[in-house]
Amino acid sequence: MNARQPSPSLHAIRACFEGAIPAVMATCSEDGTPNVAYISQVYYVDERHVALSFQFFNKTRKNILANPYATVLVLEPAVAAMYRIELRYLRTETEGPRFEGMKAQLAGIASHSGMAAVFRLLGADIYEVEAVEAVEGERLAPPPPHHGLLAGVRRSAERLAACCATDELLQGVLAVLNDQLDIRHAMVLLRDGATERLYTVASCGYAISGVGSEIEIGHGVIGVAARERTPVRISHMTNAASYSHAVRSSMREIEPGLVLDTEIPFPGLAEPRSQLAVPIVSSGRLLGALFVESPIDMRFGFEDEDALVAIAGHLGAALELLRIGDEAAAAAEAPASAPPPSGAPIAVRHYLANSSIFIGDSYLIKGVAGAILGKLLREHTQQGRSEFSNRELRLDPALRLPDLSDNLEARLVLLQRRLQENSPHIRIEKTGRGRFLLRVARPVALQEIA
């Protein structure tokens, strides 16, 4: 007689909860009449709890409210292993991180199965797991183990800890994703506390960098992850508007009768098959979001999610350390100098209403970064200045900068990259901790418009 196998832990069967194959749920009415139905989603909460998608007020729902016990049969697709889970209903959540995470995953499942117009999450039903049992039966050979994630997290921690500048830090995290985790399409977005938007500061794998492009907090996979401060993972292609890349209009009327396009195209795959966004948080504050995507279905599993959360945590801590160091740094280095400009003047328009900057007829940047560049160019043209510091920007009330927790260095990195991509004659170069140089190769004809 074979010895009874120990019950598997809930964590050990997390691969069953990816939504690739519907689960089967059995309930009983008050009088003991059984009912069996398919359910779209079983969502891992922790070692003792799962959440089930509540989509319809049907027989299953009626039974659970009358008799809180249920049995769910789940399948691990890779090896065709089945597990029976005994559950007890606790409560229903209709908002918050867990609900939003399930809603996003359900959108992907529904779109993949052609049911996007039918599937609508009404609530996340939270259950306590009372027992897990492996169902006997023949299984397939397991696929090769997915090695390298833990090593990738370690390499990330080592590399980010060695970075001494924000730009180096941002490029470092993208390099780790590419080199260690084989993630080819990624971007880092940081939070603008004044507008409650996320702005792109770094990306890799796209035809355009999208640096400076924005997305509202709460919009799309990225915005929901930031708002709820929870990972949001979609394993199948979704066309659901709530979870696609943000598409927004940025046609603004600056002057009566004058409409200007201030949109920077958002980067991203035209047809992503897998997406994963995780928040960047430090000391309880939302700093931004780390986003990855792939043209392959089910490219990111729960272990990838765990790895990205760890990397985002390291990134958040490193960003904060660099911000504090930059703000506290004194003007230790001797002022640098820039050669005098020559050649035909560069026409620059600065619209004070939203601090948007146009070089010639081309839009460059707006908001905080635009206000900074406006100040630099104004003092350059009026006073001949080229050397500036982060500290003086912080102390200038005319800039109306966000509070001290905002990462000014990241704003300068954003401005530096937008200039590199769009204006060969104006540059910002870091000259020391908390100091930078404005290099203008040609004279600037600055026009400031109220």
Image (cartoon, grey):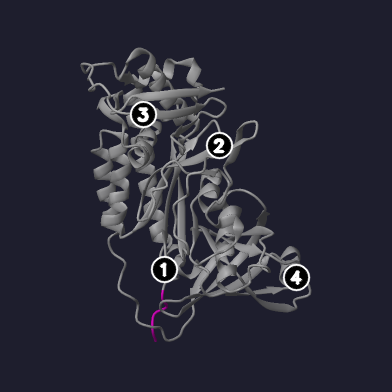
Depicted 65 relative to depicted 407: above or below: below
SS majority, magenta: loop
Q: Earlier in the sequence, mark 3 or mark 1?
A: 1
Amino acid type indicated by mark 2: Glu
According to the image, label 2 marks what residue? 196
Amino acid type indicated by mark 3: Arg
Q: Is residue 322 magenta?
A: no
**Looking at this rendering, what residue extends furthest in the top direction?**
383
Q: Assess whether mark 1 and mark 2 are in contact (beta carbons under 8 angstroms).
A: no
Amino acid type indicated by mark 1: Ile
> How much space separates mark 3 and mark 4, taking CA atoms?
53 Å
- Residue 345 is labelled as none
Tag nearer the camera, 3 or 4 = 3
Please, what secondary structure does the residue beneath circle 3 have? helix
In this orientation, does residue 153 appear?
Answer: no
Q: Earlier in the sequence, mark 2 or mark 1?
A: 2
Amino acid type indicated by mark 4: Asn
> How much space separates mark 4 and mark 1, taking CA atoms?
35 Å
Please, what secondary structure does the residue beneath circle 1 have? loop
Percent position (x, y) of residue 216?
56, 43
Quadrant (top left, top right, bottom left, bottom right) of the C terminus: top right
According to the image, label 1 marks what residue? 296
Q: Which residues are magenta?
A: 1-5
Identify which residue is drawn at 25% across, 37% down. 163
